[in-house]
Each structure stands twice: as structure tokens, then as C-alpha cells.
Image (cartoon, coloured by chain):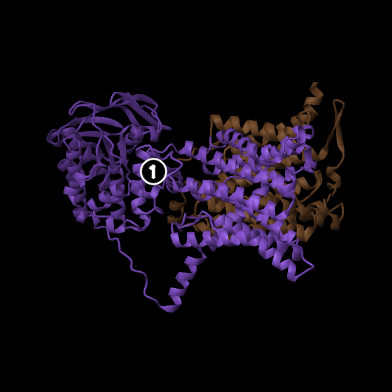
Chain colours: A purple, B brown
Amino acid sequence: MRSVLRISRDARVRWTLAGLLIVLVLLIPPLAGLYEQSNPDVSSRFYLFLGTEALVLALWAVSYNLMLGYAGMVSFAHAAYYGVGAYTVALLFQDFHLPVLIGLLLAPITAAVFGLVTGLVALRAVRLYFSLLTLAISQLLYSIAFNAYGFTGGDNGIHGIEIPDALTDYTTMYYFVGAVVGVCLVLMFVLTRAPFGAALMAIKENRERARSIGINVRAYELAVYTIAATFAGVAGGLFAIYQQQAFPEMMYWTANAQPVVVALLGGTGAFLGPAFGAFVYTELSNLLSKDFPNQFDVLLGAIVLGVVLVVPGGLASLPNLFTSLRSRFRAEPEPATVESSGESIERADLAKVVRIEAIQADPTPVERGEPLLVVQGLSRSFGGLRAVQDVDLVVHAGDRHAIIGPNGAGKSTLFNLITGRLKPDAGRVTFAGRDITGKPPHVIARAGIGRAFQITMIFPRLTVIQNLQYAMLAHRGYTARPFGIADRMFRDEAMELLEAVGLDQYAALPAGQLSHGDQRAIELAISLALGSRLVLLDEPTAGMSAFETQKAMELVRRVAQEKRLTLLFCEHDMEVVFGTARTVTVMHLGRVLTEGTPDEVRANPDVQKVYLGQLEEEAVG
Amino acid sequence: MNASQFLLFAVGGLANAAYLFIVAAGLSLVFGALRVINMAHGSLYMIAAFVTVVVANSLGAALGFWGGLVAAVLVAGAVGALIEVVVLRRVYRQEHLVQLLGTYALTLIIAGAVRLIFGAQYRTMKAPDVLTGSVHLGGHSYAVYSFFMIGAAIAIAAGVYLMLYRTALGRNIRAAVSDPDLLSASGVNVALLFTTVFVIGAGLAALGGVIVAPSQAVGLTMDTDILVLAFAISVIGGLGSIVGSVVGALIVGETISFGLANSYTNQFALAFIFIIMAAVLTLRPWGLFGVAEQ
């Protein structure tokens, strides 16, 4: 998959953009004044008005991008909250004669309430269905504004909102709006750099993985949806002040084209990308709507399409594009790259791994040898297929417990039932004396069950070190923090772990660019980084060479022993199983066939028959 | 409301459901096979309605509607093929996000283009002579055209069913729905199949637009109006399910009709639909007949 709409971490681009934008914003009024002096037939007021428009649009689009660029959510209801903010100011003025500045303070609150309530409904669904629901919400709110004549003035809207005398001066209005927008942008910027923002990026990258490191995905989505609505409310309130009106068309779902176009144009990958886009868009629409009033929609659509298909990073990615083009023509040496060939695990330093404090299962209340995970009568069917039937399983604290069985035995389903990815039809799962049956994955992860998946489940566009840092953040419950800088937290711990597993030289690379073997190593490192008491490994060595396998399992074994982790793993490689496990459970056709020490299991005639049967089937098939 | 009034609104609801089903079925079919939600589906419907009106009014009452039908389906089909080849092929393997934004861009482009070509004013046309007039029943009169719409929808539903379950094309489409990778491994030209499916979807949108053209004013907001309803139907019925489209269209069509029955509720028919959507999603987030996404 191409790296579309990714959050750029290129500090240089980001700060250049920010500096340019701030200078531009501050200089617009004096420049407009100068322009007026040299061309007496133009009015500086017009440009100040346009500038104000761009500032409000910047706020609206940046708030939209909290959802689009950070959390990967496409909402068609953002214009509705913008409208709610504008109507808050307009209605408070009209019905209660409240000054607009008080209205502006209340606008984010009403927008937040609307966002929270409607977000609760929209987030019943995920991805596509979520987008469709926001569309319906948007049209619902629009139809209220459009039709409730007694309340909102219906399709006439509300006009003639009075503003304080000081704000009637265009320059003052411009700087006033600029100050409000500036404060909001700083607040949002802090939020995106904080662990909260890290959680959003993790969700966008890989929902499943985000859950398994302990992030409550839906709660974060609701939070960012509400926060975005809140700031849209401020933008709407500002609109009502500088335009002195509010009308239902602001809320129509096609009005969302504006923040979407602006965010895409500026670049969803940089925090200020959409703000930059707002100024470009405003100027562009000013020029185009004068000369091509009828072709404007077509051009707008063409811009969106062009950005989506050709320059997914928007304007903010142009500096990078320029650098790569220049290096192509000038034949400069490529920047030094490290190649990831999957051998990192060979460099793993076991002595280091076991010293790391991050990998420390909390002082366990469960004594070694006592039951840690108890599964009773667990069943799950898919249609007619009974994938797991009446399974009983006890994993003792400190044990290394393997589950084996031919393909289709129900091992992965069992793991999914234990970790909450699937809900059981019947049965109970108890962990450290606590009933975790059917609990959501993030709760189970936080309770102390870590997991490495059978297919590689990492955050591909985050750097290797971020993968680990965010896992540590999430597992220790820091991701709700709206302040602090996520990328500076747990940096040393993560680096230590990377060094120990031989991945340190790739720390700053996007994890998805590494070779398969190295991605598996990250997967393992994440599951170890969580400091879980019980670690579930689903075919941990799938796709590794014989040497990597040996090394990886040695690592796992050693860490488990030193850190008193309990392991539950399933594996096809019998050498791995019998070399690592102290207890082996054999599953066949969804049931537990037998359980015992490796030697007992190896000697069991039923087990031999099951595996022989499979071999025969394979020979026939 | 007495029994005869009830019947009046029920038939009105069925006529709504008829054209809504035709449009929603196209959206659903495309989603089922291509896994892309086509935001421009309503735009194809609008194009067809405009083409029908223009052709019908220039050809005259006798042939007009039927000429418009042919022209509209051809134009919408061609635009659909163009969209599939130029835009969609580049976004199949990407995130939902990119697909939504890409097809959303198409709605803006098409809306602008339609305004440039046809102008902003509303247009109307007459139904063909055989389909005009009304039937009197229980003290109320029913437009013959309503029954034509219902009949056409039933015929199209049957056609779609036969296409899916009785033809080689339908077998391939159903295979594409369940496992596209396996399908291409078995030697089917998946690219061609996807284009075909998308053109069929566009054709269904077009048929909806054609059928609706004589029954309401044709204007520039048609694309978003129908899109919201088609999405509502898909969410209620479940994306990718033709049966879901039928049930969803019936629910939405009747809700609109009975919503209009009362002067207090007529402004908020959409609100009722939204409430139904919310209720369905609370119980089954993937719709009544949809399949849960893993």
C-alpha cells in the first residue's frame, strides 16, 4: 500500500511551514494597506475580509484533520458542528440579546454536546458505515436548521448580528479572529504531539494492534470526534461574528467539501498543512470565482482528485518532492540507507534483554505454579463450523505452555477468544482470578495479557521506535494524556529494548519498510514491551529461517524465565515446541485431545494418529 | 387516517421504494463486488435524469421517454466506464479513506459539469401517453405512473436476480464478492469484470434517474438528495445485499410517504429515517442483511 496521507514527522518541513504561515498571517494587514496605497481603486478591506475568511477556514480544516489525518476518519458531519457554533452565536444574540463574544464562548460547548451525542451514534459503526452515518447526521441537523422556522429562522437564516464597535474595524477584526484561531491551533498542536495524538495515529495505522496494546479504540475515536466538533464550533462562532449571519446552507453535507479540499490541498500529513491550504484555497477561489464562476466546482473536484491520486501529501509534501526530484536530476548520492535483511535477531543480546526493566511482569499475586489463566467449557461456532468446542485449559504461572494441532484445530480461534477479539458462545475465561470472558481486547490487554499475532501486526508507517514507545505508553495507561510529547516518552526504554533485540539501527525507519524477519522481531518486541504477565504468541517464528527461529525462541525462553513471564504459544514447528514448552496441549477439530509434558505427548498414540492422519490427507490432497 | 387514505400513502411509499431500490441496488452491487462505496452514484443518477428530460422534450411525447431511456443509460454507462478505468482502478487496493475522497471529488466534478451543460434551472417532462392518467379507487385517485414505477422495479429486481444467479457473469460477480484473489487465479479477467460490474451499477443508477424524471422536477440537488437516501437504505439493509436493498428501500420509501401524510411530521421525514438507521445500527451495525466486517 502506498504511503497515503501519512503524518509527516519531518521536522524541517513542519517548522518552515509554520514560520512561513505565521509571517504571512501577521503581514496581511500591512501588505493590504500598502497595496491600497499603490492602487487606489482596490480596497484593503476586501483583502482583510478574505484574510479573516482564510483564518476561520484554517481553524475549521485543521480541526477536520484531527479526524482525517490523525485518526483516519472521514466524517461528512463536520460542517454541521460548524453550523451549530454559528447558530449558537446567532440565536443567543437574536433571542436573548447576548453579546457575540459570550456567544463565542458558548459556541464550542454546544458544538461539543452535539458532537458527543451524535458521535455516540455514528461510532456504533466503523470506517465506511461510520462515514455514511455522519452523512445522515449532517442531513438531520441541516433539516432541523432549514425547517424549524420558529427557532432558527428556517431557510432565511439569521442576519444582522450586531458586533462590538471595536470589531467593526476590519484590521481589528482580522487580528481578533487571528488570535482566537492561534490559541485554538496551539491547543490542538499540543494535543496531537501528546500521548493522546500517539494513540490516534496508532489507531489509524492498525486498529487491531492498537486494541491489543490496550487502547480503547472507540473511546479515542469518540474523543477526537467531539474535540474536532468543539473546534469546528469555535470556527462557526467566528464565522457568525465576522459575517454577522448564520444560515442553513453552512450545514449542508456538501459544505464539508471546504474543509476536505483545504486539508487535502495543504496536506493531511502535517499539522499546519490544512492551515496553509486554507490560505491557498481562499486566494485560489477568489481568483477563480471571479473569472470562472461556473467552472469552480469542477476545478475544486479536480483538485481533490488530483491530490488524492497524484500528490497524496498535498502542498506540505512538495518540499520532499522537490528534494527527491533534485536528487534524481543532479545524480547526488542517495542519502545513506540501512538495509533490513532480517538478521537483526542474530544480533540480539540476551543478557541485555533480561536486564531491561520495561519487560517486567508486575509483582505477581499469582504464585509460580498456581493457575494464572483458566479456560472452562469455551465454545465458538461460525455458522455450522464448530471452531472451538467445550475447551478446558489451565495455564500455570511461570509455565511455557504450547498448543499444537493440525490446521483447523482451533488454535487461532482459541487465542482470539482469550484475547477478546472474538466473543465466545459459551464458557468462561478467568485470568489471575478475574473473569475476563467476552471483555473487549483493550481491557484484556491492560489486565496483563500481551499478544504477538500470526500475521505481522505492527504500525507500518510509524517508526520502529514509535512502535515500541506507543505500546509502552498504551499499556501503562498514558495515552489519555492531552499534554507532553509522546515521542520523548519511554524513549530510553524503547531504545534499550531495540538494542537488546538487535533492531536499534532501524529505530528511525518506518516499521513497514523492514524485511519480514525484522518485522517479526518488532512484533515480538512489542509483545514483550508490554510487560504483560501472560504473553500469547501465535506462531511466533512463522516465516523465519531455521537460524532466526532458534535465536528468537532462545530469546523468548530466556526472557520468560528471567522476567517470570508466562508463555502460551502455538506453533507448527515441532522442534520449537518440544524445545521450548514445558506443557503441551494438543487440539484437534476444535477440542482438546490431550495434555501433558512434551515427552508424554510425543508418546501418545492418539497424537501420532492425528498428525499421521493429517500427513495422509496432505499426501492425498 | 382511514383505510383508503392508508392505501393511498402506502402506494405512494411503494412508488418511492421502487426508484430508491433501483438506485440503491446499483450502489450495493458495486460495493459487494468492488468493495468501493461510490459517492458519485447519485451523480450518475442525476446525469441520467437530465439526459432523459432533454431527449424526451426534443423527441416529443410519443417516443420521447423511451428515447430518453436509451440515451440516458448509454451516457451514464459510458461515464461509469470512464470513472472505473480512470479513477477506481487506481484506488481499489487503497484505504476506504482514499476511495471515499476520490469518488467524492467525482461528485463535485460531475455536479459542476452538469450545471455547465444543462444550466441551473429545474426541468420537467411528461410521462409517455400510455403511462399518464389515473385510476380511481376508494375515493382517491392513483397515478398510473406510480404503478409503472412499481412494476419496473419488480422487473429490474427480477433481472438483477437472474443475472446474478443464472448467468456466467453473475457467477463471476458472486465469486468476486467472496474471494477476488481466487477469482483472478482461476483465469477470469478481473479488470474487465470489475468494469462490467461498475457499468451495470451505473446503468441501475441511470434507470432510477430515467424512471424518476417524469415524476418530479429535475434539478441540481438530485445527486445529493438520492445519495443520502441510497446510503440510508444501504445502512439499513446492509451494503452488498440485494435483498437488503429491497427491504431498506421499502422502509425508507414508506417512511417518506407516511412522513408526508402529517403536516407536523412532513418536514422531518429524514429525521425518522435517521432514527430508524440508528436503531438498526444499534442492533446490527452491519445492517439487516449485511455481513459483518471482520
Residue B270 percent across, percent down from the top left: 70, 35
**Number of other residues with Cα within 10 Å of mark 1, as a class: few under 14, some 14 to 19, many 20 or more:** many
Residue A497 percent across, percent down from the top left: 26, 49
Q: Quadrant of residue A41?
A: bottom right
Residue B106 seen in render: yes
Residue beneath disc 1: A209
- Residue, x 74% and y 64% (percent of image)? A292
Q: Quadrant of residue A355?
A: top left
- Residue, x 78% and y 30% (percent of image)? B9
Q: Foreground: A158 or B186?
A: A158
Q: In which quadrant is the N terminus of chain B drawn?
A: top right
Q: Quadrant of residue A609?
A: top left
Q: Is residue B200 above or below residue B283?
A: below
- Residue, x 34% and y 53% (percent of image)? A464
Kind of residue sitting beneath label 1: Arg
Q: Viewed as shown, does residue B183 lie left or right of B139?
A: left
Residue B81 seen in render: no
Q: Foreground: A245 or A598?
A: A245
Q: In which quadrant is the C terminus of chain B drawn?
A: top left
Residue A400 percent across, percent down from the top left: 20, 36
